[in-house]
Amino acid sequence: MVRRLALAQPEAEERLSHGSPAFFVRNKQFLHYWNNHHDDGWHALWAAAPAGAQEMLVAAEPGLFFVPPYVGFRGWIGLNLDRATEDEIAGVVENAWRTVAPARLHRNA
């Protein structure tokens, strides 16, 4: 489902990054999928997010959202896929794409 949602975004491309699927628009990463990579227990998305969203989401629903390592300092959010609904996943994917994609692509989305 994550792949389908991510690749439905205009000009989205999939590449492996650190051994896991990652999604890009115009060579800028907007989403990373983790499925127990290195037996770390994570089944999650790491996603670009608009300014201020990380703090708000993590505070409101800490079991669902978290600050991911490595990219959290850039405002990215983590989404626990074991607890997320399909609508929540779709919303995070679309918002991540919109955060990174050039503005002129938004008009076509």
Image (spheres, rainbow, N blue to C red):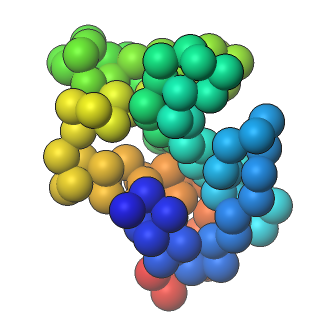
Residue 107 shown left or right of residue 101 in the figure? left
Residue 26 shown left or right of residue 106 in the figure? right
Looking at the picture, how far across and down is residue 96, in whole percent? Answer: 50, 50
Considering every residue shown, the one lying at the far front of the view is 39
- In the picture shown, does residue 13 fall above or below 91? below
Give the residue displayed 62% in from the left and 63% down from the top: 101
Residue 51 in sight from this viewpoint: no
Q: Quadrant of residue 56?
A: top left
Looking at the picture, how far across and down is residue 18, in whole percent? Answer: 79, 36
- In the picture shown, does residue 46 fall above or below 106? above
Give the residue displayed 32% in from the left and 17% down from the top: 58
The quadrant in which the N terminus is found is: bottom left
Viewer-nearest residue: 44 or 73: 44
- In the picture shown, does residue 103 fall above or below 35? below
Looking at the picture, how far across and down is residue 34, in whole percent? Answer: 55, 35
Residue 71 in sight from this viewpoint: yes
Give the residue displayed 48% in from the left and 77% down from the top: 8
Q: Quadrant of residue 71?
A: top right
User: How many marks do you count on the picture?
Assistant: 0
Considering every residue shown, the one lying at the far bottom of the view is 108
Residue 105 shown left or right of residue 65 in the figure? right
Residue 32 shown left or right of residue 3 in the figure? right
Looking at the picture, how far across and down is residue 3, in whole percent? Answer: 50, 63
The quadrant in which the C terminus is found is: bottom left
